Amino acid sequence: MMDKTETIEAYAVTDSNIVNKTTFFLGIPLIIVFGWLNNKYMSVFSVDHNDHRLVIVYSGICPVVRNDSLRIKGSMANGEKLGIHGMMMQAYSIENLDTGDMYHQ
């Protein structure tokens, strides 16, 4: 895994999928279980970068529509831990150049 920050400009190939991921559960069992879940949202989509598809993972809500022009800052990583064949980018900043929206952690 590389920790080097990169900036790319690319077009979205897919719409973003926003996933609600449970991070942990804390509860007290008293006949029924009382407790709460801590959730985290993740956005996943693909872009066309250097004639290849690159999977982008962003920790948060980032609505992207196919063919949006994007400027993405993040670090490249091997996607095997997430079940992605090849490289992926863990993004921390996404700017939609078509709408002017910015998403930053």
Image (cartoon, helix red, strand yellow):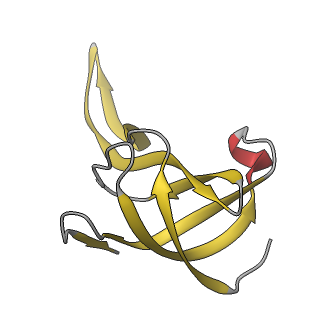
The mark tally for this picture is 0
| Residue drawn at point x = 69 percent, y = 70 percent | 76
Q: Based on the displayed image, in which of its 4 quarters is residue 82 positioned? A: top right
At x 34%, y 57%, the residue is 60
Q: Along the line of sight, which residue is nearer the eye, 5 or 21? A: 5
Answer left or right for 15 relative to 61. Answer: right
x%, y% of residue 69? 38, 62
Q: Name the image quarter holding the C terminus.
A: bottom left
Question: Residue 40 in the image: x percent, y percent?
Answer: 35, 50
State the quadrant of the N terminus. bottom right
Quick one: which residue is furthest to the top in this view?
31
Residue at the spot 29% in from the left edge and 70% down from the top edge? 97
On screen, residue 104 versus residue 71, left or right, reads left
Q: Quadrant of residue 92?
A: bottom left
The percent coordinates of residue 43 (x first, y second) are 40, 48
Q: Is residue 14 above or below residue 52?
A: above
Horizontal and vertical percent position of residue 6: 61, 82
Query: What's the residue at 62%, 85% (across, down)?
Result: 5
Q: Is residue 54 left or right of residue 67?
A: right
**Looking at the image, is 76 positioned above or below residue 5?**
above
- Residue placed most toward the observer, 79 or 41: 79
